[in-house]
Amino acid sequence: MSWQQDTRSHLDDFVCSSHKDQIVSIYCQSCDVLICPKCITQGPSKSNYHKQHVYLDLADAYLIKQKQLNQVITNFKDATQTKKNERCELNALGQRLKLELLRKKTAISKQTHCLHDAITKQEKSYVRHIEMLLKPAITRNELRFNEVDFEVVSREGALGSGESVCHIPEEKPIQFLRAMKRIESDLVKLSADSGPVSMDSAPELRMVQKENLSLHQYKSLITRAFTFPNQVPSVPHVLSSWCTVGVTSASITFKCPNSYIIQSYIVVCQPYSTFTEDKTGEIHMANKWSKSARSDLEIIRQNREKFAAGKGLPWRKRGPDSQVFRVKSTMGRVTAVIRNLLPHTSYIVQIHAINSCGSSQPTKLYLTTLSYSETKGCGRVSLTDPHSYRSVWVLCQVLLTASKYVLLLFLLLWVLYAIFISWPTVYEDGKNAVTYICDFVATIKLPYVGSLRRILLSKPFVDYLSFLMLMGNTSEDSLVEESATDNLFTDEANTLDSNIQSKWFLQSVWEWINRFGENSTGVLF
């Protein structure tokens, strides 16, 4: 039995809704219903209802509808997955919003506590300062008050005595005169005391009044501390002309356009060969805590107080290396000093600016440390091309190096020429030119003297001088014998003189080399 026949056998139980004596066996594609043969010829009301429509066999209709259903299910699954992804994104967004809210609350609370602690500390400092200013004045005022109070009491007593004397009758003149003399003496003594003190003349009070004028500075401090940014920081701008690169360290100077709302910076330094960055911009560090990989520095965050701009940023050490990173701020510029780098190694540096709204986009910086053979200060910094910053030999460096070697060669030839010309001259102190030159060269403080000494003490040069001295001794012996037999030939005499000069010259050079070996400690390099 074929598949179509099997399908028909399962559809025998379906009766046509319009003709009860017929079983549906045809599918009308135009009306999208199952019909019987009578529906085509007669229709439900004896009219050609389905005439000239498109008909399909049930098996073919099954296949077509199955494909359509599969397509609908696939589309529905895709739409459902899209909704699921949207739900996940909304959930993640909600988590981020909650986390941001918590972070904002924490930042505000932390900033409030810091400001409260700062104000409390400053309050105690001002109170101690005012107490130090006013305590001596208060002590003097208390002493003066006691003195004046005693004087007032004394005056009141004298005044009472004087009033009582006035009531002595005329019948007692002797008593009156004696009391009057005593009262006058007391009044004169009390009148001689100093007058009342004026508080306007107290210098401590004027100083305290001036100190109170500086308290208005806290108003601007509090206003600025609670002024929160409404956007993330701008991308930090690197001042490449201010950056310097050495052999094991680099100094990077940068600034942010809206630096007054920057709370901290993140500076990441990593070798260019191991640098990786994912699609979200997060930076991954290789061997983050490895002590052997000194150049793999950790992300170091430097906190910056909003009211401490221009006074320098505090810095702290993190990671295995000590004093790896330092940040300081001057006139809006921030300088990051990275240490413990490897010589002649390429690095990539990323700088982020952070405030309460988030982190800025990173600024990439490419640099290469110098090798020990390169001139100090010729390292380069690039913001775009990771290969354009490499240190290269330029014409001025080639000429400078060539001129140094030419100068060294000229110095060597000049010394040899001076020895050859002035070897026979012996001065009053018993020294010749060779001795003076040896003493001079052994004590001068110039570079490349060590290179000259290494050339003169090298084995090929010493062997060559030994060979020349041996040849000079042989020539001298033969020429002396010839001159003893015949002293009338001036040419032979001149030859003798020249060979003797050559021998003495070689001996002088040999002596000079020995002097260098003995006085090697007198040479700088």
Image (cartoon, rainbow, N blue to C red):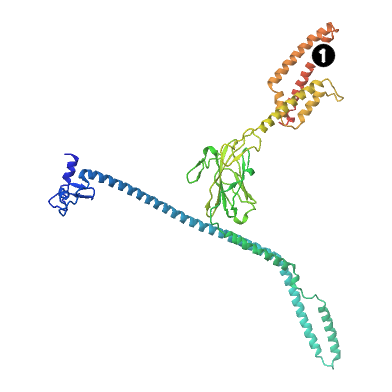
Q: Nearer the viewer, residue 394 or 454?
A: 394
> Which residue is more in the foreground, 173 or 285?
285
Name the side, left or right, on which 438 lies relative to 286.
right
Work out which quarter of the rendered image holds the N terminus and state it.
top left
Q: Secondary structure at mark 1?
A: helix
Question: For residue 397, which quarter of the picture?
Answer: top right
Placement of 126 over or under 276, stated as above or below? below
Q: Residue furthest top?
A: 485
Residue 330: x and y in percent read 65, 50
Using the rendered view, name the quadrant where residue 163 is placed. Answer: bottom right
**Residue 149: quadrant of the picture:** bottom right
Residue found at x 81% / y 8%: 481
Place of residue 199 in the rendered image (x, y in percent of width and height, measured from the top left): 74, 72
Q: Residue at x 86, y 89 (%)?
A: 174
Residue at position x 63%, y 61% in the image: 122
Q: Nearer the viewer, residue 324 or 430?
A: 324
Please indicate whether residue 411 sits to the left or right of residue 71 in the image.
Answer: right
Query: Residue at the location (51% across, 57% down)?
Result: 104
Q: Is residue 99 above or below residue 412?
A: below
Which amino acid type is shown beneath numbered disc 1? Asp
Which one is in front, 95 or 255?
255
Give how far across and how far down residue 80 sits, in percent.
Answer: 35, 50
Name the residue tied to disc 1. 497
